[in-house]
Amino acid sequence: MDFQSLLKTAPIHPDVLQQSLWMIIALPLLGAFVCGVFGRMMGRANVHLVACSAVAGSFILSVLAFWATSHADAGVPTSVANAFGGAPSRYALWQDLGTWFSAGDFRVNFGLLVDHLSGTLLLVITGVGFLIHLYSTSYMEHDDGYWRYFAYLNLFVAMMLTLVMGDNLVLLFVGWEGVGMASYLLIGFWYTDAAKAWAGRKAFITNRIGDFGFLIASFLVVLLVGAFVKQANDADLQPVASTSARYSAGLEQRGPLTFQGLETMARALPDASGAVKLDTPISSGPLEGRTYGGVLTVALLLFLLGAAGKSAQLPLYVWLPDAMAGPTPVSALIHAATMVTAGVYLFCRMSFLLVMSPTAMATVAIIGAATSLLAALIAFAQDDIKKVLAYSTVSQLGIMFMGVGMGIFWAATLHLVTHAFFKACLFLGAGSVMHGNGDETDIKKLGGLRKEMPWTWVTFLIATLAITGIVPLSGFFSKDAIYHGVHHNHLHGLEWVSGFLYYVGLVIAACTAFYMSRLYLLTFEGQRSPKAKVAHAHESAWPMTLPLVILAVLSVAASVYAFPLLANSKQALMENFLSPVFSAAVGSRGDAGIAKAAGTVALDTSLPSLGSYAMAWATVVAGGLLAAFLYMRFFPAQAGVPAPGFARLIRRTAQNKFYVDELYEFLIIRPVKFLSFVLFRVVDAFLIDTVVVRGTAWVTARVGSALRYVQTGDTQAYAAVMALALLGGVLYAILKVL
Amino acid sequence: MVPISYYLFLAAALFCMGMFGVLVRRNALVVFMCVELMLNAANLTFLAFARMRGDSIGHVSAVFVIAVAAAEAAVGLAIVIAVFRSRGSVNIEDIKTMKH
């Protein structure tokens, strides 16, 4: 049996396996329950066993599911029937656990979907997740809250798996909120330190702002689907081999928010022959008179707000650097490898909607580029090892957003994966450095760790080279694939964006090389700083170094996916692998794709040339060499001499994060606080407490004290009143009768 | 046969006399007797209407009123005796402690 057919023969047949997809989520959830409830009485070693094996079990199931998505019986790949008519989703497993809830004609099913995109993410989440669990067993060995820590970590994994496996937007949102909560719990893990607890709150509230956008966007999508199903006729759905009756039947069965249904709608929308096109006004309902394309753009921009919150993009990126208050393995898992890529995943998952709106795409790309550049510049002058890595994460996420925004979805996904490897490796390396140096995070007080921590050094070096983009490593290829797409894809009506963003991208690459080289050089090279907390650092134990080595190997090996190794196609491996997912949006062989049908994006499928490779490489090397010159020669030689004025100004501005936090404080937090103060003083304290609550009591008391003189105690007076009332009643009755 | 209005006028007169007594007399025992007078005025009305209609519902009501009146008299007299024992008077002008 050759390699190809081995890949296409899953050890467990997809029909069998897709009945068990729920277990991928259930295992870590069970682990979280056991660790959280019984953790303290079980003891440290048992908690480690339960938490790690839950994630390991989930990883094994993910591998089997991933394998099964490529399974083919006699050349026919495993697929999921399309409930909305049209072609089945190929290379996918699907489990429907029935209706979750329904109200009127709105319903949400509990459906789990594993295709090549979510399968890749499953492997990253459970694989990197397991390595980080293993690492944590050693990193948290002196912490009394170990059981709480592992319960939260398992909960996070379960929620992240829900996010990527949900087959509809509502289930995705459950995971979206769940990872937000796990992130909040873990950032504020050491809650006795007020600053850390505040960092958790900041993350949570910033994310809530984004989630608000996500929810409104989902409501808009529901309205859009409702309008579409009323207005569309069979001619609209004819190109997707469906009819409006079948489409409505699918909606009744599965609800309006499944990705399959949205994809079918997206394919039908740009078609010229039907009644509904992107510029058709909606005929009835709350959105009456607005065009389909317009509503879609607004919904996508709101989704962008949600993604900006979760993936730390402008304007909501401010929480991520503060999130470094959590334990370092948490930063590696949640705030570098998995959770923060949820926004990228969301747009990849909904690529078919995104490509219909060039405005939304350009906004996504520009936001990504701006965030990336800003974060890279801030990272120049940060002295905290974790803060540098945090800003670097923000910057790399910005690059992924650029890729998504310019329609090069496969490269964004590949960068997501490679970034998960090398950034997790960097964070875990930083954790190892902190562990061996008495929790010192200031890189100015480290230095010369190369000989003292050899394993940490070598893995950190490889990951640094990978993120800066040195040639044979994965970061170079994934980043360059994005830049190539950004350069050559053109948005209709917004052609200037691609050329402009490409040069911004080169600046970002140079900046990345600069700050990463600075971080590496100050930490590992040169002399040990005299201000170091401990005289000699110690290398960490094997549960910490082993994940480092595995991640370093992966950040080298992952570059394979960017090579065009296929015999019958000139696509890169990853592009070919993800084409069943993205073919609806960008097209593939025998499938024009929505982008072409709608005429919104001109996509380029060529491979990068050696010239552009050389240019990207030269940029990176220039940035790295500049950092090497400055921090190895220039500054050490001038020790004691104050730096030139402009350099100090730049440093101070970058160190203070371009005063963005202060700007937000001034523009948003102060006005909100003032408004809250007014509401508190005027509305709550005065109107509600004083006027309404105490006022009622005051009036009642006054009226009572006036009326009490009526109670004389004289029985005959009471009887007289009763007699008069009776007389009045009788007179009234008589008058009525007469 | 006596017309029904005669009975009703008699009952109204009895009722008004009873009510007058309840409102103006000061002796609790007399007030009680006036209450009985009012009840019996009501009984007379019941019986008059029963006779007019030729059925027995009015009789039944009258029997109920008599039973209630008996119970009321028993309880009321007990209260009057208790009040007399504690205060040495059955004048209701002296029993005005239940006030503001």
Image (tube, coloured by chain):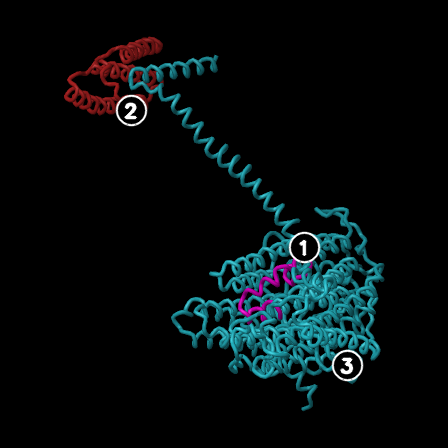
Viewer-nearest of discs 1 and 2? 1
Quadrant hosting residue A604 = bottom right
Q: Colour of chain A?
A: cyan
For this orientation, the residue located farthest to the front is: A641
Residue range (magenta): A309-336
**Residue A625 position within the rendered picture, expressed as x and y whole percent measured from the top left:** 74, 76
Residue A340: mark in rendering = none
Viewer-nearest of discs 2 and 3? 3
**Residue A374 position within the rendered picture, expressed as x and y whole percent measured from the top left:** 71, 62
Say which residue label 3 marks: A564
> Circle 2 marks a residue in which chain?
B
CB under 8 Å between discs 1 and 2? no
**Residue A129 position within the rendered picture, expressed as x and y whole percent measured from the top left:** 57, 74
Say which residue label 2 marks: B60
The amino acid type found where label 2 is placed reads Val
Q: Nearer the viewer, residue A177 or A549?
A: A549
Q: Are marks 2 and 3 on the same chain?
A: no
Q: Are marks 1 and 3 on the same chain?
A: yes
**Residue A272 position within the rendered picture, expressed as x and y whole percent measured from the top left:** 84, 59
Q: Nearer the viewer, residue A137 or A606?
A: A137
Viewer-nearest of discs 1 and 3? 3
Majority secondary structure in the magenta region: helix
**Residue drawn at (80%, 77%) of the image:** A613
> Circle 1 marks a residue in which chain?
A
> Circle 3 marks a residue in which chain?
A
The amino acid type found where label 3 is placed reads Pro
Q: Across the whole image, how many numbered discs are drawn on residues?
A: 3
Above or below B12: residue A340: below
Residue A15 visible (yes or no): no
Q: CA distance from mark 2 to mark 3?
A: 107 Å
User: For numbered disc 3, what is the local secondary structure?
Assistant: loop
Say which residue label 1 marks: A217
